[in-house]
Amino acid sequence: MGFFRRHRILGGILGGLLGLVLVLVAFVAWRAKGPYRFYRLNVVKTAATTGVQPGTLEIGVATRDITPDLSQYDPWVDADGDNRFRPEKGDTYTDANGNGRFDAVWLAGFNNNRPAQGVHDPLWVRALAYRNNGVTGVMVAIDSIGITNERFIKVRKSLPDTLGLDLVTLASTHVHEAPDTMGIWSYKILRGYFDEAYLDRVLDACGEAIVEAVSTLEPADMTLASARIEPDGFMDDSRLPQVYDDQICAAWFTRPGTRDTIATLVSWGNHPETLGGSNPLITSDYPHFLREGIENGVDEPNGAPGLGGTCVFFSGNLGGLMTQLHTTVPHRDGQQTFEKASFEKAQALGENAALKVLEALRSPDAVPSVNTEVAVAGRSFLVPLQGVFNWAILAGVIHPGWYWGKSRTEVHAIQMGDLAILTVPGELYPEIAEGGVECPDGADYPGDILETPPLREAMHGKVNMMFNLANDEIGYMLPKTQWDSEAPFAYGREKAQYGEENSGGPLVGATYHRAALELLRDLDGHAALAVNR
């Protein structure tokens, strides 16, 4: 009797464990499935595909304020003044809604557990719509650290078909002092402190701005300009080899025959993180001062009048890491300099960049775009993942949607007259765009360089912009031959350089490079049909 009872007990335990394993497998499979699993973007639309001859370019613009109202969150006391919530150090909060937890705006970037204590300047969603020759698209810049692909798909699916949109491009500016929109910096991730309601508000604002921007489409002239920004005083490349995305690019849209500004589109690759990890105030960092300078002007001394209208800013190639954290930024007065993290430093950086744009657009070298054809292309593709990113996506912790060791993301290409735009779903190392990929001794994957030719060589605009963190955020995108996480380390270093820990793996950059080239070639092929028909 004891024999059979022991086996029944053992069988029950094993059955329970098997059931638990099956439940766990089912849960992981459900999380790995992700939303919109079978969504695939695959569009190429040009004058050749629509059969409509290019006419007058149309542009529309709209904005939405997405600054959180801190009065709707729990007040708290930072007893030790370290700008982090630590009850063990005497920090306290008032549970305003009685839910038993600290409801705060958790700032993204740098440290986990950084509750906002105030607002320095507003956060924005800014949408720019464009239309010509039967092609309509919209691009949206969002003051956020990053938003993943499935969230942007949700925005697209919420839009009315009557808008007639062929391509919707959404990108985060990657500001490091905005609310967490990825679930990585929200105090205690596993206890659900992530603010889904705020993210829903941001996505709703994107949809509203898109609808309004399309409704305001009007005829526009386009003037293009770019200016080289010397790294000194603007940014550092914090990782060898030092390769910079040193072009600040601009498109100025005005009402025909006037200098009455509708919008200015600007792109530049420099991390918006001037305030550093100790700042407790919500801000869009230097992009705030750049946009304000372009719209309203920069005060004397050595200032310039603004252009009016709405400035829409997108971050360019940021990987590497393009940052001003260790840069001494000069004031335009030629007297003051700012080394430490501060709003004065952010203002000086943003205004100096704005002055570069204003000078370039007003110079004789600025290019009025006689060509007005609009052509768009977009495609989903899968990137191979390794390490922590692979398992985190499998478990649905970040970027839900796991495809047997790969993740779905997107690349877009836009040709608007003489302006070419290519999107990047993460933070691209500039050498993949500009050239200069190396295969240093000691790196983990010696061999042929895969990321060639440089992507900007494959773009055919008189001004070529690249938008990072567009339609996704998959982290740093390195050249394979520069991947260096195992000793011996490259460049004679005793330890690894920063970067790999925030990347999906050594093949992400090369996979994106190949997908981007294929899309550009497809777009070029359709454009050639329009010319030769």
Image (tube, grey):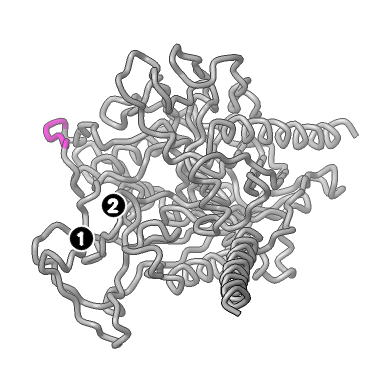
Q: In the displayed image of the protein, which residue is found farthest to the bottom?
A: 98
The one of 515 and 352 positioned closer to us in this rendering? 515
Query: Which quadrant of the rendered structure holds the C terminus?
Result: top right
Kindly identify the residue that appears in the image at 18 percent across and 59 percent down: 83
Q: Position of residue 343 (x, y in %)?
A: 20, 49
The one of 470 and 306 positioned closer to us in this rendering? 470
Find residue 154 and name its label: none
Q: Is residue 189 left or right of residue 25?
A: left
Q: With respect to residue 140, does 339 lie above or below?
A: above
Q: Give the residue at mark 2.
A: 111
When asked about the image quadrant of residue 84, the answer is bottom left
Examine the residues drawn in magenta and state their main secondary structure. loop
Q: Are marks 2 and 1 in contact (CB under 8 Å)?
A: yes
Amino acid carrying label 1: it is Arg
When asked about the image quadrant of residue 12, the answer is bottom right
Find residue 84 and name its label: 1
Query: Which quadrant of the rendered structure holds the N terminus?
Result: bottom right
Kindly identify the residue that appears in the image at 41 percent across and 56 percent down: 143
Kindly identify the residue that appears in the image at 31 percent across and 31 percent down: 235
